[in-house]
Image: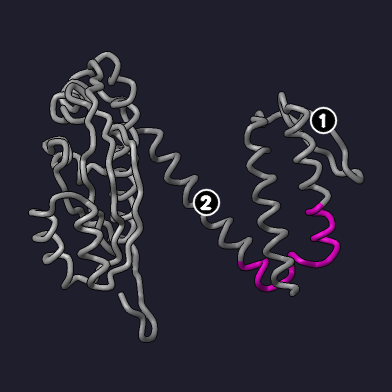
């Protein structure tokens, strides 16, 4: 019971902290906007709603400290893990600040290389069966779907074999389709059925409609710039982690699977 209460309190504190971020503290300044049992609350341009959330959190923190929860082993471990996560993320964020902006040539090249996302962009209306299938059934399912008249026939085939699946109707613009699926989906005609890997199973989709909705290079440029910047940050983070691992002495102790 005590553990459940602690987890509930931590969840509430996490929700309260989400609102605090919106208030945008200014580094190096101490603008006092409230005091809670003598503890000063500093913020810049905090909305009334955000400030009330901060006060609620401070009251909960004070009670938690008074109850000695910061010395509880499980809570202390969670605090340490959160601290380490924040420090690691702060290091990567600082390193990512050096990532150069995408050049017009890079944006133009990405636009040209991905017509299904931009110049030939479509909004797809689909029927989907999300199937929990063992590996040995997937190839057989692909063969069955290749000559099935519609998705109902595939569903009946799955039911006959006791396979578990759920059905749904989807409307997805190209940018919401997984990139691994988009090339094949963009080539499909209305009525076609395709089977895509979707661990731990597969996704069987039938194309019902494809509405043309192209984006010009000018319209797509801000989106491409954001995507390329995010990809560069991810690549930099992966490279930095590899560099740090190469220079570190890492020893695995005991029967640890690697």
Depth check, mark 2 against mark 1: the one in front is 1
| Position of residue 147 measured from the top left corner of the image (x, y, whole percent) | 8, 54
User: Residue at horizontal 22%, vertical 23%?
Assistant: 212
Placement of the C terminus among the 4 image quadrants: bottom left
**Which mark, residue 95?**
none
Whole-percent x, y for residue 35 in the image: 87, 38
Residue pictured at 15% horizontal, 63% vertical: 141
Q: In which quarter of the image is residue 31?
A: top right
Q: In which quarter of the image is the N terminus?
A: bottom right
Q: Mark 2 near mark 1, Cβ–Cβ under 8 Å?
A: no
Left or right of residue 38: residue 124: left
Residue at 44% across, 41% down? 93
Note whether 139 is above or below 240 in the view shown. Answer: below
Q: Main secondary structure of the magenta part?
A: helix
Q: Is residue 90 rendered to the left or right of residue 127?
A: right
Q: Quadrant of residue 42?
A: top right
Q: What element carries label 1?
A: strand
Q: Distance between the residues labelled 2 and 1?
A: 28 Å
Residue 87, disc:
2
- Give yes or no for residue 65 being in the magenta stretch: yes
Range shown magenta = 60-77
Pointer 1 residue: 33
Residue found farthest to the bottom: 254
């Amino acid at each position: 019971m005590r553990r459940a209460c602690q987890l509930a309190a931590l969840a509430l504190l996490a929700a309260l902290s989400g609102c605090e971020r919106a208030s945008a503290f200014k580094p190096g300044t101490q603008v006092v906007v409230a005091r809670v049992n003598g503890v000063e609350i500093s913020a810049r341009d905090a909305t009334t709603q955000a400030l009330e959330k901060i006060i609620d959190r401070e009251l909960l923190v004070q009670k938690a400290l008074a109850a000695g929860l910061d010395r509880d082993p499980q809570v202390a471990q969670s605090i340490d893990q959160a601290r380490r996560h924040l420090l690691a993320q702060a290091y990567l964020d600082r390193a990512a600040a050096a990532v150069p902006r995408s050049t017009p040539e890079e944006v133009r090249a990405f636009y040209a290389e991905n017509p299904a996302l931009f110049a030939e962009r479509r909004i797809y209306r689909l029927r989907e069966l999300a199937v929990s299938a063992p590996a040995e059934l997937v190839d057989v399912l692909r063969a069955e779907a290749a000559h099935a008249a519609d998705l109902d026939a595939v569903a009946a085939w799955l039911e006959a074999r006791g396979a578990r699946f759920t059905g749904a109707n989807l409307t997805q613009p190209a940018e919401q389709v997984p990139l691994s699926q988009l090339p094949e989906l963009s080539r499909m005609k209305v009525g076609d059925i395709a089977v895509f890997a979707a661990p731990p199973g597969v996704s069987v989709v039938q194309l019902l409609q494809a509405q043309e909705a192209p984006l010009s290079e000018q319209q797509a440029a801000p989106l491409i710039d954001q995507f390329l910047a995010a990809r560069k940050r991810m690549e930099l983070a992966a490279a930095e982690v590899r560099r740090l691992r190469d220079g570190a002495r890492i020893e695995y102790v005991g029967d640890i699977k690697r």
